[in-house]
Image (cartoon, rainbow, N blue to C red):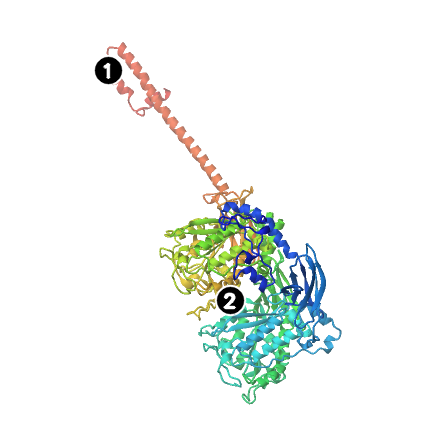
Amino acid sequence: MKTGAPHCPGDEDETFKDGITNGAHWYDVEGGMQDYNYVWANCFEITLELSCCKYPPASQLQQEWENNRESLITLIEKVHIGVKGFVKDLVTGSGLENATISVAGINHNITTGKFGDFHRLLVPGTYNITAVLTGYMPVTVNNIIVKEGPATEVNFSLRPTVTSVIPDSTEVKVTASTVAILNSSPGTQSSHQPIQPKDFHHHHFPDMEIFLRRFANEYPNITRLYSLGKSVESRELYVMEISDNPGVHEPGEPEFKYIGNMHGNEVVGRELLLNLIEYLCKNFGTDPEVTDLVHSTRIHLMPSMNPDGYEKAQEGDSISVIGRNNSNNFDLNRNFPDQFVQITDPAQPETIAVMSWMKAYPFVLSANLHGGSLVVNYPFDDDEQGLATYSKSPDDAIFQQIALSYSKENSQMFQGRPCKNMYPNEYFPHGITNGASWYNVPGGMQDWNYLQTNCFEVTIELGCVKYPFEKDLPKFWEQNRRSLIQFMKQVHQGVKGFVLDATDGRGILNATISVAEINHPVTTYKTGDYWRLLVPGTYKITASARGYNPVTKNVTVKSEGAIQVNFTLVRSSTDSNNESKKGKGDSTNADDASDPTTKEFETLIKDLSAENGLEDLMLRSSSNLALYRYHSYKDLSEFLRGLVMNYPHITNLTSLGQSAEYRHIWSLEISNKPNVSEPEEPKIRFVAGIHGNAPVGTELLLALAEFLCLNYKKNPAVTQLVDRTRIVVVPSLNPDGRERAQEKDCTSNTGQANARGKDLDTDFTNNASQPETKAIIENLIQKQDFSLSVALDGGSVLVTYPYDKPVQTVENKETLKHLASLYANNHPSMHMGQPSCPNKSDENIPGGVMRGAEWHSHLGSMKDYSVTYGHCPEITVYTSCCYFPSAAQLLSLWAENKKSLLSMLVEVHKGVHGFVKDKTGKPISKAVIVLNEGIKVHTKEGGFFHVLLAPGVHNINAIADGYQQQHSQVFVHHDAASSVVIVFDTDNRIFGLPRELVVTVSGATMSALILTACIIWCICSIKSNRHKDGFHRLRQHHDEYEDEIRMMSTGSKKSLLSHEFQDETDTEEETLYSSKH
């Protein structure tokens, strides 16, 4: 290039001095990119012509790299020439964005970046440079010398042209990091007055939305705005979380919630919660009470459970029911399952969303804010007879205490005569009442909270007027602000603590906390933490868990805060496990226990299983994926080949077979040792595209594969997952159907079947007829070496688990449902159970999970075949309502499913990892492992086996030819694998009987047989000898007879022979004669 004589064919005479040229001097190019960069951005760009041939043969690429390598690196280094620096505010010291940097004599300016930083390329020389920004005095620095090499650093400090206004102290935004400084200021507490809300008006939905987003944006360190789902009319069901660590459950910290506007025309609660959000945000860090509450409590505020009803309600309403119900005209506070009455109304989207929410978070205390009276109402809300009578809950005492904590701070409520004009005879002593004693409410939310979760909830009636005029709103805040705060503090009463495993010190999920004589247990959360509200007194409290010995403690509860009581439980199977080490199967793998890398990986799995563990992984990962278009079969093939070429050490691409139209069914393996057998590692497969008209799954799997490759050796968690997992990705099982399908066809079946018109998800049988199905069966499923399979499909938003065929019972249902729930719970909306698909807006799928046959029953499905013949659990994920949504939605669909897909990679490392050997240490392959008398898996090469199981205690039977059957028990954690070593003894049983007995009986039998044989032989021998004697006599007399014939001429032959052949028993004389002979 530097010779300036490229000698390109057709332009042999073309020359460029030193190998460079001005673009327009060479030829004119309108609309070129390099000019746009220079004119409209801060970037200097040049265009490089690298070779005469535009598309040279691949054989020349190595030479092209050698020609250009040093040039490319040198050009990169030139980014550091010229001048660089910062432009800052002289008063505050903060960087100034978009300040102009101009160089005298050069008519080309650049601007500063977000932090006031700038880089200006210049050749060596002396320059005068000026920094200018509106609102500031310009500054010029003269005689700046630029030399060869690194850039000269020049910083500018600009003085504002107007005096800075000090912000109103009431509006200062305080972050968590400033709290300690603010609280340490002398005299703060004594002189401090909390900042009161200023925003008193009725907020319709758009206004409320803006309000919530504003505070979430202004106070990101203590807030998180999220949605539970959507109302009937598709309005978001917003919740504002306020916590010093938003988005995270901190072990040991209780969770609290307020819900407002359940009845759309009862609006005071809605406005009070917006006021409370403002109050907590503005006072955090300055007011000790608020700061302590936010530090010690995770607070969730839901201003409106019924946003549709609110939009129909009318200001000034006191007694009407306009807007009370949701848009389907159902009363949401009569829509929850009830303990006494069968609720026949269909569950509403708002109800379903709130129930899912309550099941997902470990709420301890809650209040439901209503209007129409002035009283705190506590459970139960109804009774068995449906009468207005006191219906006492087991926790009546604590309910009265927490109800009083609210009412006594509201003087008008505490008087107990709320609405004299409307209800002159109504009286509530101290402003509280038992719900059913007031009037009967079947299907209410507060009772469902108490009976179905760990949460204690009351219903608070805030005023006689349901929809007061706007001018009265400040009065409601003043009456209730102390009550709202004091009620939240009640979450810190009673007993709290952890239930821990004595073996490893880990928290036990779903352990039960029971209080003697109070028939209402609560359960522990993920880290074993629990909270139990109680009035002051002495209690006998028991902690118990499946597979553990219970522990009971006597506890004294005082009035000032919760007392901490921790329980450490010993596994009830410890003795049997100790015994098993003598030959029935150890509960831990001693070899791995001392391996530091194994311990490190176990810690990683535990960390990733913790709340927000996967979010942390994703935040620390590179995720610049090009999810802007769909891949045709050709593009998909090139994409996969590209991954293998760029990441050859962790990928391997194979073809499982060909489709009906001879397209390859690609299988990509991702592992640190691709195509090498590692039976000790769990193996997971991801399959998509069984229906060609639903290609979202294909794109998600391509994104997952690239994400893993991109982050390998960059992100430690991803690296360890790839190193210890065999990941198989089959992105398109039905490539022929995919080629026929069309983008944006949300309901069309075009492309659903393969080229022969067969729905492949009905062809997984022992007589499979389609080439695609046969390829998957023969090359994946029948290998029986997968621990988990995840299939991606489309047409709704849910997860189904086996079986798709109608069956009466489902073996291992608990585990299959657990795996499906895990995916749904890591999805932002799937777990809410409201796909909200067109024409199915009322579809309700509890938890977003359903058995396949209950959703769409059919025979010959892939997941049924996988479970039955592959001994591998498989779930099917439906990623979107639209079969083939616009490519513009792919990025958001990846964001929705990314965490769930990664959770499957974590989950495959849980369950039970086993190793089977004999007493000599020899591994036993092909042993049968039977779990819970149902599930069967076989040991792999090297004696390894792995099976996923739901958390809890499970029984294991191990069977191998020539060995005694072994039994053991294992406890499976929710955040770690359990290791089992099974040691076989040689089988001492013959025909089902003990070897010793069989040998003894056989020996006795053989002795008897030998003795019998001897006796028979003796008898036969005696008898045989007698016969021999007779024939001997016969021969002797015959000889004598012949002599007589020769010697004698007279006598009768007949008489002699007759004498000789007489019976031996004829006479004693003859018998004697025979004996003597």
Q: Position of residue 534 (x, y in %)?
A: 62, 72
Q: Nearer the viewer, mark 2 or mark 1?
A: 2
Q: Position of residue 930 (x, y in %)?
A: 48, 51
**Residue 203 makes an appearance in the image:** yes
Compared to 172, does 895 lie above or below? above
Q: Nearer the viewer, residue 989 or 839?
A: 839
Residue 303 placement: quadrant: bottom right
Question: In which quadrant will I find the C terminus?
Answer: top left
| Residue drawn at x 68%, y 54% as measured from the top left | 149
Where is mark 2, residue-wise? 829
Q: In this rendering, is residue 775 above or below 696?
A: above
Q: Secondary structure at mark 1?
A: loop
What is the three-letter code of the residue carrying label 2?
A: Ser
- Decide: is 491 above or below 740: below
Residue 442 can be seen, yes or no: no
Q: What residue occupies the far front of the structure in this picture?
A: 13
Residue where numbered disc 1 is placed: 1052
Q: Are marks 2 and 1 in contact (CB under 8 Å)?
A: no
Horizontal side of residue 75 vs 683, given as left or right: right
Could you tell me how many numbered marks the image carries? Answer: 2
Q: Earlier in the sequence, mark 2 or mark 1?
A: 2
- In this view, the residue in front, 819 or 4, is 4
Q: Residue furthest right?
A: 186
Spatial separation of the CA atoms under disc 2 and disc 1: 129 Å
**In the displayed structure image, the side of residue 154 where residue 33 appears, left or right:** left
